[in-house]
Amino acid sequence: MQVRPIGQPYPATEKGNGVAEFRIRFDGVSKYYGQQCVVDKLRLDIEKGEFVSLLGPSGSGKTTLLMMLAGFETATEGQILVDGYRVNDVPSHKRDMGVVFQNYALFPHMSVGANVAFPLQMRGISKAEIAGRVKTALDMVQLGALSERKPSQLSGGQQQRVALARALVFEPRVVLMDEPLGALDKNLREQMQLDIRALHQRLGLTIVFVTHDQGEALTMSDRIAVFNKGKIEQIGTPRQVYDEPATRFVAEFIGETNLIAGTVEVVEATSVTIRMNGGNIVRVAGTDGLAAGQAVSVSLRPERLSLTQVSGTDASLPGNTISATVTDCVYQGDHLRVQLTGAGDASYIVRLDRRSAEPQRGAQVTAFFSPEDCKVIAS
Amino acid sequence: MSGKSFLQKSGPLLLVAPLFLFICLFFIWPLGSVLTQSVSDNAVARLLPETAKVASSWDGQSAPAEGLQAAFVTDLRAATDEQAVGDMVRRLNSAQSGFRTLMSKTLKAVQDKPEGPIDLVALDRKWSQPQYWKAITDALSPTTDRYLLAAVDLMRNDAGEIISQPPKQTINVAIFGRTFWISATVTIFCVLLGYPYALLITVATGWKKQALLAAVLLPLWTSLLVRTAAWFILLQEQGLINSALMDLNIIADPLALIFNRTGVIIAMTHVSLPMMVLPIYSVLLTIPKNLMPAAASLGAHPLRAFVRVLLPLSFGGIAAGSLLVFMSAIGYYITPALIGGAGDQMISSFIAFHAQNSGNWGMASALGIVLLVVTIILYAVYERLATQRERSA
């Protein structure tokens, strides 16, 4: 089932024929609204078959970037390349990209089936073929029985699945999703995340997914691009951006973290020693071009910390230790959330296993973690 | 206790009572009287009570019997109100030509001889012909459909069948046709101009949107007469438009823009435009902004996206606007009267003519009723479309 492309701005290219291997490349793309810079000289390559999430707070430029890729906005400068061809001036109806909008954007006057048939009709495909492909697409999202309904007769989740079927039915080069699950309730959202992920793997789709929900990005993506103020702060696999945040912004935006300011004391071959504000000395794996005397922050994930009731430093404990006082302890169902205050009024959040004994408020404890479980961020 | 609850119950009713009375007095009652006027026919009957009593005994074919003639003379002697007599004569003459001279002759004879029988046939041979008596007996019924029939160029023949009027007297159907034609043309122009304009307001932002909206709303707050007078100035031979075009050497001689159909349609289109723009704008506002981008992303050329998505979704607004414009256009009076020529006068002008110049209230009412019925039918269509839209939305 080969879809006849609309216009032919770019032929399909494969690896090894001299043309770049990436499917999409943003080459120094900027977008200004008047004097305001929304996207700032941005570079990003997305490979064929890759699921890339653009993650960031609202106003960080992620949606604008998607809109430029879809052709709804024009780049003020820079190039957008698809399969090696510049598409800046290609109108959106010739870009052959499926877009799933936040509020579904289904045509309310058409039935579900007609909505899904729309992109195929635009491509001049025969009626018989359209009928078959619409059925296949609706079956794929488990809505085969509802093709005669109007969108207004469907639930939010069903409407979103229709929008998905409509964006996939014409086998677009790339599927763009603009916070598609934002309007759904939590359980449905998590189900849809897994469904979209499964479709991505089964159909080998190239997906660019905009979201402000870090959990969603971690669940679904091959790679996550973390946006802040029109720039990409870090791009990497979910594991990379979570475990090795490159900047303070990334560490704070993705997941919860303890950021403790300090100064580099000694740089060794594979680790550094850092004197934290308050006097604790910790050893952190990796050197990352740090120099002695440099001011840094240490990012420490709450679930990587362990607690012991013994107070004071204990040589028997592995790795780094911090003495602290328990100021609060909350049972959260799947974990215990403990708040500590250490030397220099530094406060720490610790996540303990739900089966751990609840520490008493005011108890003196020692928190410990290995050098591999924290990350130094230049600050 | 029960008195208090009665007051509580009737309180809201008392609040709407003034409005209710107002509507009764200034809407329902005049409408009722127009309806009555269009079918009432008592100009003859109220002066000829005796004739009415014996009229049924006449077979309508032969020359009338003595009794009928005597009753007629008695009634004429009793009729002293000259205005009423004049109305009766006009009414009879409109049913049967020749009555005016016949009646003036007869009335004079009746005045000259206040007592005893008068031989009408001897007075004028016309009284021996049954059609004159038929005209009188027909006119004795207090209700008539002759005005309503005449309003659509129909009449009853001697046998009482409905037939079309002789070609020389048919005018109303042509006027109604002209009225609907002008209204339809104006409606089409309003759609063609109003839709893009409403679309422009929808996509505009900031002060531009305010300016565009004001351009629609300001004329609405200006008197119709003022707007029409403005067009009178703009369109005339030495008017702004002609002189501008001539100064720019686009035309050598002034265009004929006034006292013709072109001028009427230009002015009426302008005057009606807000009624088209506002409903379309209100519907366009409700259409989600991301549908057109969605259509584009699915491969629809902007024009196809418009035809497949935006146009069907805004059809309700076009229908509502068209019906509003059309319904108000068929009642236009001032604009055609000032801007149009003799051949561009619409049905309202003729209603005014019948009411003011010829004093034919029955005819004026009947034309008004036809107009009202057409408007009600159109309104019913509009309601149906509107509810369908609500149901599908």
Image (spheres, coloured by chain):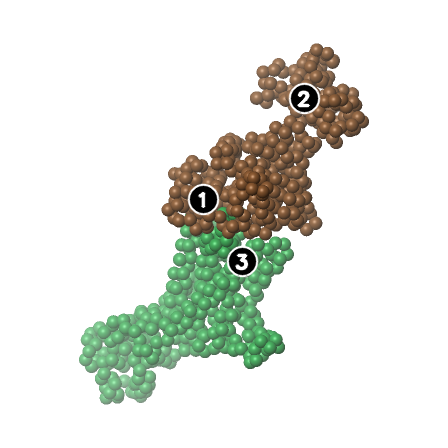
Chain colours: A brown, B green
Q: Secondary structure at mark 2?
A: helix
| Residue B223 shows up from this direction | yes
The front one of A50 and A140 is A50
Could you tell me the amino acid type at mark 1?
Answer: Gln
Alpha carbon separation for disc pair 3 and 2: 64 Å
Alpha carbon separation for disc pair 1 and 3: 41 Å
Could you tell me the amino acid type at mark 3?
Answer: Ala
Q: Is residue A48 left or right of residue A113?
A: right
Nearer the observer: mark 1 or 2; the answer is 1
Image quadrant in which you'd find residue B141: bottom left
Residues at marks 3 and 2, common chain? Answer: no
**Residue at which label 3 appears:** B198
- Name the N-terminal-most of marks 1 and 2: 1
- Which numbered marker is on residue B72? none
- Which numbered marker is on residue A2? 1
Could you tell me the amino acid type at mark 2?
Answer: Glu
Chain letter behind tag 1: A
Q: Is residue B130 above or below residue A327?
A: below
Contact between labelled residues 3 and 1, with CB atoms less than 8 Å apart: no
Residues at marks 1 and 2, common chain? Answer: yes
Q: Residue at x 62, y 33 (%)?
A: A236
Q: Position of residue B367 (x, y in %)?
A: 39, 70
Q: Residues within 10 Å of mark 1 (few under 14, many from 20)?
A: few
Q: Residue at x 57, y 80 (%)?
A: B252
**Residue at which label 2 appears:** A372
Q: Is residue B47 above or below residue A111?
A: below
Q: Position of residue A254 (x, y in %)?
A: 63, 31
The front one of A142 and B331 is A142
